[in-house]
Amino acid sequence: MSINDIPADLLDLFDDYIAGELNEDGISRLNDLLVKDEHARRCFILYSRTHTDLYAVARANRASHAALSALATLSSDPNKETQPSSAEPERSTQQALPQPFRRNSLRTWLAPLATAAMLIVGVFVYQSQTSAVSVQIAWIQNAQNCKWHLDLPPTGDMYSGRSLQLESGLVEIGFESGASIILQGPATLELLTANSARLRFGKLAAKVPKSAHGFTVLSPEGKIIDLGTEFVMSVAKNGSTEVYVDKGEVQALGNKSEAQKVVHVKEKEGILLADGAVSRRPSQDSSPTQFIRQITLPPIIAPRRVTLDFKETVSGSLADADGLGTGLTHRLPGTGKRMLQHDTNLKLNIEKGQLELTTTDSDINRRYKLEQGEYLGFRLSDFGFTGTEDFSIAVTIPEIPELAAVGQFGLFAGTRNDRSIRGGLIRDNTATAKNSTDKNVTIYQQFMANNNGGSDSNGFFVGLYASGEDMQMTLRRTAGKYFLTVGNHKGANTIDIKHPEFLNGEKDIFLGLYGANTQSNTPQMIIIKKIEVTVWEQLKYAPLAALERK
Amino acid sequence: MIQTGATVLHNFDYKLRVAYDRWLDAHQGCHLSEVPEHDLKVEYADLLQRNQGQLFAYLHSLVRDLDDADDLFQQTSIVLWRQFRNYDRTRKFLPWACGVARLEVANFLRSRSRKRLYFSDELSLLLIDTQEKIEIDSFEDRREALSECVEKLRPRDRELLDECYGNSSGIGEAAVRRGRIPQSVHNSLRRIRRSLFECIHRTISTQAHGRENA
């Protein structure tokens, strides 16, 4: 209805009525006009409804503004924020289910916002009323990969009348009565009472203990009353409803059926609710498989981590020139054979909290002088590695040294000197540059290479770094794939190359760092401030059990 | 994001939900294990929830004052439950509920001396009848469209709406703040309301046109 469909004098009366400006005569006149004419009444209903709805919009808008202000306060508290370690692959944060929200995701921001909005809306709308305490009638017990409509998950507001619009994922909802359902997105469910709900659309699987006898699910075509069972139901877009009983018995009633025509649906039986009536389905031997009846948690991943900050000696580890344990435990097999037990190329500087590695002339590529090569690190099986877990090594190196061409330093993972993947920085023998103080600096390229059989393959070179800069370097295996990240204060760059299939399934992998003044006689010192090695162990048990194991 | 139409309106429903929750609290004596009683409660909750927007708007159109409409809505929902066993299932719920609401309004007006400033019983009944002929879906569509239309208003109009509809002493305060007389604020509201009404019409027509072409 357009505004022009309302006669002008009538519209004036409507506005005066709404504003409370009509006297008795005016009310009486409007009353008479409306009594006489149905079209006028129709106009009045729609116009005054707009007026009512405007209250809704304005008041909710105010509440939203208040919620946004509340959010500003929340986000200004730095203690609330937790950042994952830069060495930690993204995957580990994503696997931190079953917490409903992931760190650093947009939802983490929206969750308090939504909560604040709900709280403030409640307070605002009811500010003139006595303490109206709403009672939650249901709770989210588990969730997996949930995407909620408008990104608004239910957060402490599962009151009667709440509509849950799940766009995708699974959510397990427990009702106060003890009944529980698994809602499978996309689905829309409305909470009614502590023992009932309405499924407008989508699929659910219900488990109802005796205490919740009578648990009722309404659908657009009828209702299902549970008598202490397990059942599944789905509601199509047109409202037609299918129900199948896994265990026990339910009662079904169509919208248009008389109350006494309740249909009893027994175990392994199915019914269809359509056009307001119940019809039986041919009996099925096997239960419908398209329903998810249980939320299975993704594997729990626990990090096993060692961090060396070189502020103390570690007994039983590779010793430096003075016999101090560096904390590094193994060399890559096939390297460093000629090194003394007290490696003269290593110095543990406890005072400064750093390990100083003097490079030697060696190269993994073509197995060049590897007996004097410095390829130092850890044996992953010491961290519970069995061949399938992901892992990473991260190092912090201040002030990149000036190695002559084709000097290089970086990180490696492999089983021996001719089976490895490595990457890091390699001296670029063509580029030269001056830094901001007009000093000549050495230019490095970020690179990564496989070595299977002694010679490098799949080499990849990218980006430029200058000597004197500070840098962090991480080599990680995520979901079985290798990545090398090199970063400085300007940002980080991650590269990967063809997957080294020859390392698949290898159980005895060594992970570490190396430094080499390849093809030159000018050793340089590489300073290492920190090394962190992590193996992500897949646990078969729930997180609690994992804690106990620790 | 938080302010999209559906969210805003969903939040407004909250007040009706709280009213319903209070009603539930007051009726905890009904044991869930007694299936017939529980059954009835489920049915009632479902019907009330589906029709609450309509019922509230009906009350509001009769009494004009939002707080009065709030009180009457709560009162009516309790009376409806008490009479729910006698509700004739062959009749539609909304006309029945509005009929009960109308009597509550009449009781309420009796306690007020200025009864003549309200509609007649005859008109209250006729309004139920006419409302019944308008499809419920269209009210929902109009509410959605209204939210969109409010977003499109000029900032100063939106601000005025927010002030006047956002709290009960709004118009007076808004007038003082702007150095205007209340009548002039009423006139502005009237202009904004009419433009919104037209915007709703255009929005719904465009949507319907889009569906036809789809």
Image: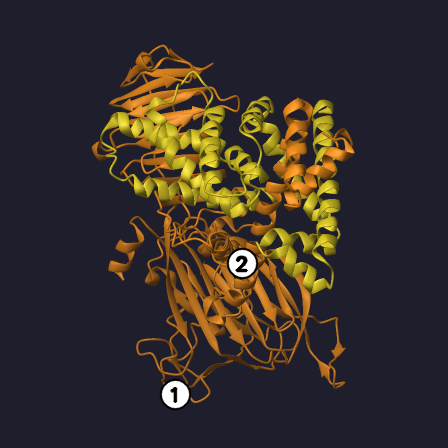
Chain colours: A orange, B yellow
Number of callouts in the render? 2
Q: Does A232 sit above or below residue A117?
A: above
* Neighbour tally class for label 1: few under 14, some 14-19, many 20 plus, Cα within 10 Å: few
To which chain does the residue with label 2 belong? A
Q: Does B166 sit above or below residue A310?
A: above
Residue bearing mark 1: A322
The foreground one among A90 and A436 is: A90
The foreground one among A295 and B38 is: B38
Outermost residue on the bottom side: it is A351
Report the residue at 44% width, 46% height from top: A154
Looking at the rendered structure, the secondary structure element under dot 2 is helix
Query: Which sits earlier in the primary sequence, circle 1 or circle 2?
Result: 2
Residue bearing mark 2: A67
* Neighbour tally class for label 2: few under 14, some 14-19, many 20 plus, Cα within 10 Å: many
Q: Position of residue B53 (x, y in %)?
A: 52, 36
The foreground one among A332 and A213 is: A213
Report the residue at 59% width, 66% height from top: A486
Looking at the rendered structure, the secondary structure element under dot 1 is loop
Report the disc number at residue A280: none
Q: Position of residue A40 (x, y in %)?
A: 68, 27
Residues at marks 1 and 2, common chain?
A: yes
**Residue type at mark 2?**
Ala
